[in-house]
Image (cartoon, coloured by chain):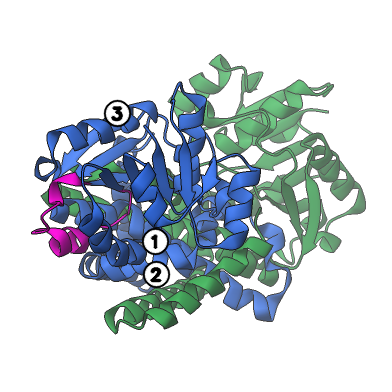
Chain colours: A blue, B green
Amino acid sequence: MNIGIVGIGLIGGSIALRLKATDFKGKIFGVEKNESHQKKALQLGLVDEIISLQDALAQCKVIILTVPVDAIVNLLPEILDQVTDQVIIDMGSTKTNILNLIENHTNRGRYIAAHPMAGTEYSGPEAAIPNLYKDKVMVYVDAFRSDEDAFEIADGITEQLEMKSVFMNADEHDMHTAYVSHISHLTSFALALTVLEKEKSQGRIFELAGSGFESTVRLAKSSPDMWTPIFKQNRTNVLEVLEEHIKQLTMLHSKIKEEDYEGLHKLIKKSNKIKRIIK
Amino acid sequence: MNIGIVGIGLIGGSIALRLKATDFKGKIFGVEKNESHQKKALQLGLVDEIISLQDALAQCKVIILTVPVDAIVNLLPEILDQVTDQVIIDMGSTKTNILNLIENHTNRGRYIAAHPMAGTEYSGPEAAIPNLYKDKVMVYVDAFRSDEDAFEIADGITEQLEMKSVFMNADEHDMHTAYVSHISHLTSFALALTVLEKEKSQGRIFELAGSGFESTVRLAKSSPDMWTPIFKQNRTNVLEVLEEHIKQLTMLHSKIKEEDYEGLHKLIKKSNKIKRIIK
């Protein structure tokens, strides 16, 4: 069984690396329009060959889409038009729009909406790492709409990646990811902008950057090409969570402004409940 | 030379652990009013004995203050009243208020304002780790106001902790820490509150929490007893940076709201410049 990966960056490259470390037979083809990424992917041995999307559809049983979500929205309908028994796995971070778009497509059953909850702040083929997915969660969205044989093949790959599976509908998925992933990126981008703004006038501000700063701001290194389309595709949920977040920050602000330190202490203590959830 | 550490938690306990791993002769005494912390500190071997502040002043050449900053503000004047040739090192995270408070004290020279740019989101004696300070920055604030012999002793400890030294005045220090440390904590607290709020109505939201979320929210596990006084003592700077941060978030919000994705892409790309600064 050959696999074609469309977009050989952090996500696609890490799938390739992991599959090559298993007893996966078959070839891994890369479909990639960025020439320097093509070269890098071959150099790093992520893929056996770079081929066109047409050739990938002809030669592969499985096509995995790991390009930015707006590119998936553009590509998927024309891919499904040409599908016979291939399996098309979409690894994008947003699902509602794409699922609505192809809802009534004749070949809907060949399509799997999946979202691996894994990543780093780095991008491109050099960012690929073999254990990116190990013990992380793969979310399947509206899995009941996929053909059983197609789902089994996709889930076999999820198993090879050593991931746990979770099932959701599209609305749930897009709302939850807005809260636990998309907002984290927005706060990091904003934090970086805040501090860079100040640095202009103050210079040595970063001498003091400690580990707390690094961990909250590291996501601000993430690719704008990847993230702008995510915010676009998940606009409604992202606006909702961003408004709630600004409200919470404004509450902390007014406690400090009004010197209500008892109230501030209470809010911080309340936020500590996050201990229940993350290690 | 004996050392007395006032407040045996993450900061004080980690100093003790590191000193005990060097060829430090002398005893390490703990001054600690929390009884369970007293027991824990003895059990973990962080300190040789728990004694009173009075006894510490009588038996130690060096007193290190690692209690919350409001407790330092309360304690320091009475400690300086009793000092003869001891060295008092304040490891708190804010400096302007405390320095103003003791500016004209007869024993001002025995006091060292230092701030180790190191920490974790955990607190209490169990949180102490031996390499917390290794390769991190120790900021000395208005060091020229300390007696030379007192400074040399403090700097000897900094060296034992394997830290680099940086020198600043109080205004610089409090402004810079607001930007690279205090704001990171506020964004984490607010992020935790945002997500916990949603979880109430939505339940399974945290199944999806990936590594991005964990790193941006982990500081929300930090102690309210430690952090409320920091925001109080550094109120003006913290309000300034919080206002700037809310402004930046609001800018991201309006780009998404107005569907100006080119503008959003530009802002994210601008935030990427943080790569220059953090590894």
Question: In the picture shown, does residue B131 fall above or below B273?
Answer: above
- Residue B226 horizontal side relative to residue B31, left or right: left
Q: Are marks 3 and 1 on the same chain?
A: yes
Task: Tell whether label 1 touches label 3 (CB within 8 Å).
Answer: no
Q: In this view, does B102 lie above or below B12?
A: below
Q: Distance between the residues labelled 3 and 2?
A: 31 Å
Residue A156's disc number: 3
**Label 3 close to label 2 by CB (< 8 Å):** no
What kind of element bears circle 1?
loop
> Magenta span has A109?
yes
> Residue A140 versus residue A176: which sits nearer the camera?
A140
Q: Residue A68 carries which label?
A: 1
Q: Where is residue B100 in the image (x, y as percent from the top left)?
A: 66, 68
Task: Tell me what residue is drawn at x 84 percent, y 45 percent.
Answer: B155
The CA span between labels 1 and 2 is 9 Å
Pair 3/2: label in front: 3
Name the residue located 40 percent from the left edge and 56 percent from the top edge.
A53
* Front of the two marks 3 and 1: 3
Q: Residues within 10 Å of mark 2 (few under 14, many from 20)?
A: many
Residue that appears at 53% across and 54% down? A123
Which region is colored magenta?
A90-111
Q: Which amino acid does label 1 sit on?
A: Pro
Provide the chain ID for the residue under circle 2: A
Q: Which amino acid does label 2 sit on?
A: Thr
- What count of labels does the image hold? 3
Residue B225 seen in the figure: no
Residue indicated by mark 2: A228
- Tag 3: residue type? Gly
